[in-house]
Image: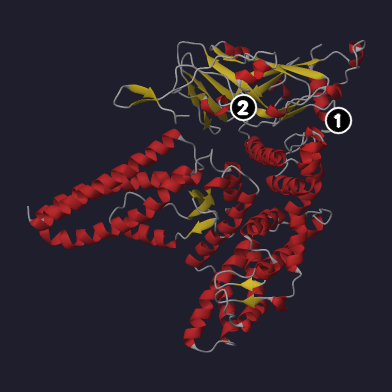
Amino acid sequence: MVLSRQEILDRMEKFKVDEEQNLVITPLLFKDKNDIFDADSVDLRLGCHFLLPKTLDQPYFSPDRSSATMLHTRVHVPLGQFLVVPAHQTILGATLEFIKLPSDVSGQVLTKSSVARTFIVVETAPWIHPRYRGCLTLEIANVSNTPVLLYPGRLICQLVLMHIAPANVLKGSDKETQPSDVRFDPNYFGPVYPEAPKFRDPQDDLLRIGQTNVAQIRRIRLKHSGKGWRERSDYP
Amino acid sequence: MSNGLAGLVHDAAVLHRFVDFLEEYCKEQKRSQSYVDASGLFFDYVEKLAQGIKRMLAKEIDRAARFPNRLPLLRRQFLTLKYYLRLLHALLKPAADAHTLTIPAPLIDLASEQIQRVDSMRNSKIVILLTPEFMYFQEPHTRIKEQATIVESFVPDAIFPSQLGFIELPYSQGPSFFTNLAIYHEIGHFVFEELTRMAHPGVQALRSATNSSLKKIFHGRQIFAIVRRIVDDWIQEIFCDLFAIRLMGPAFSFALVEILGMLGFLSRKAAVKFSPTHPASACRFAEHVNMLEEDSWWNAISDIHADQKDLLKRLSDIPRTSYRFYVDDNTLGSQSLVEAFVDFVIPAIRKLVREITPSPARAVKRFQEARQGIEDCLRAGVIPHSPSKNVDPISIINSSFCFCLTSLSDVIEKFEGHAGTSDVTKQSLWTKRLEMWTMKAVEDSQILQRFRTAQSHGLI
């Protein structure tokens, strides 16, 4: 069931921050509640930090341990400035608001309809788990044929919140699941800037399913030794 | 064209290339990065200066060709320009490195806003520089301003921004938050230099009090001059510490304890040593505690049990009779100089600091009201905030730093389990997280403040 505006407000105001039912969305900037609250959602603003794709020095991208640093360049755009997203380009941004979800609530981030009509698409992995804390990383794609300006501080997406099934529904499994059993992902805990993806190396992931033979592309450097080109042994 | 003129044209061309580079460099930095306001002002100034110099070079060389008697004057002006550009050159690259991704920009914005509330510092702004040294510095600016004034007489296009200060941050500390509170001490140096430059009555009074107390002990003219120079340095250090405490509160003292501890200045033996440039750490911390007590901060943090606070108290309790002045590592200096400084000069410094800085009484009260809420937020893994009101940045910083010193392991245990509390990597990661949350909370508080101000002015 989707949380109504009143329940969202109640959870923000009536519960203390250390209570499981408490919801945090901060900072909230509005003159009138209608500015950001709909009957069933809250609008969120674009933050000031971005990760822009780097031009790679190799013809492919392999999601592995090194990808957190090799894929993006960090950029700060203060309030009042804008960022140009070229046509058909993708970037990572983050919400200005820091979110804490209650233990019995999941969330979904959707592009604001007015933004979507400029062919800016926010989020392709929009699900937020209960007890999540942090600013939300937004995958932003300009799928239009023209560059689009993004202003930090403007409303960009909406957060829809939903109750998860109560614990007693899960009875019958080996152990009754409680909201407190929802684990924190230490990799993505409490970010305030957009987060680059964090991967393990593919061979480590595949070993978990018993695969012991994994293909890999290796970069080599050649050296001419007088008798022809040879692979350099000292090249990492 | 005479030989003299040919040489001058060559010189002018070299200068032209140099300033052309500086102009392009400034433009490039502004295009590619974001900076705090003061850095932007500094780049604008250098750009305008470069354009002005290029115009001046073209015009003056043309005039010199027609009036050869102008050549000596032009040569002197070129020398002045070269010297001044060398000073600016040394500042430009460290300022360019200090963009908003490499410095704690919300803290710099907060500090800039606070010093504008200090007596006679209404227009002051701080340019941040990143230094390779592992220490915080203030770049003395009086010489730069003097040169800027001379240059303005023949390149009138660019006016050096009034009350612009330069503070250096170690590049490795840029992204951290709490240790960077040390910049408040360096800002104190900037303020002291500005007040001295404008002959502020409070600084004049401090100078007279110092002179009269030293003259009673040191009679020879030469010895007095030497002693005076040493005491001037001591005065500045104590002034800057007290200035920082008045603006930031106990968080500054904790940050200084961390930094001096890292540099090895806090052993009992080192802590009582006055050097020719610095008063003993014990003396400095005695003044910290004294100021914190008088401003009611000490009482407000009475329930905080942190090693840093205990150390602060232990050092401040060292009797003044233990202080020793060492001229170098092995040579003892005059004990009566230390006594005169502690008994007569320090009270005059306290008085000056109180005169020029706003009272922290409201900040202490707000801290006491907000602290529990801020700690609850951090303990719950949430950035400090309040659903009902805007929490002020000084409360956020002091409460978060106290929490970090006393309860970091609680929050690690809550989210990572008990094993995490003795894991160095996790301690480091969680300290970084708390610092990020604190910085974001300060930034949010500034955004909310601007929002409320706009609302109260009817703009929204």
Do callouts 2 and 1 point to residues on the same chain?
yes
Secondary structure under the numbered disc 2 in the rendered image: loop
Query: Which chain hosts label 2?
Result: A
Q: Is residue B223 above or below residue B299?
A: below
* Residue occupying the point 61% across, 51% down: B114
Occupied quadrant, residue B3: bottom left
Does residue A117 show up? yes
Q: Residues within 10 Å of mark 1 (few under 14, many from 20)?
A: few
Residue B164: horizontal and vertical position, in percent? 47, 53
Residue situated in front as seen by the camera: A133 or B418 = B418
Residue situated in front as seen by the camera: B188 or A81 = B188
Occupied quadrant, residue A160: top right
| Residue under pointer 1 | A19
| Residue under pointer 2 | A195
Indicate which disc, 2 or 1, sits on the residue closer to the N terminus.
1
Residue B249: horizontal and vertical position, in percent? 70, 55
Q: As shown in the figure, which amino acid type bears the numbered disc 2?
A: Glu
Q: Is residue A161 above or below residue B411?
A: above
Residue situated in front as seen by the camera: B80 or B357 = B80
Q: As shown in the figure, which amino acid type bears the numbered disc 1?
A: Glu
Query: Which chain hosts label 1?
Result: A
* Residue occupying the point 48% across, 55% down: B163
Marks 2/1: CA–CA distance: 27 Å
Residue A81: horizontal and vertical position, in percent? 51, 31
User: For this view, does B221 lie left or right of residue B331?
Assistant: left
* Residue occupying the point 84% across, 54% down: B303
Secondary structure under the numbered disc 1 in the rendered image: loop
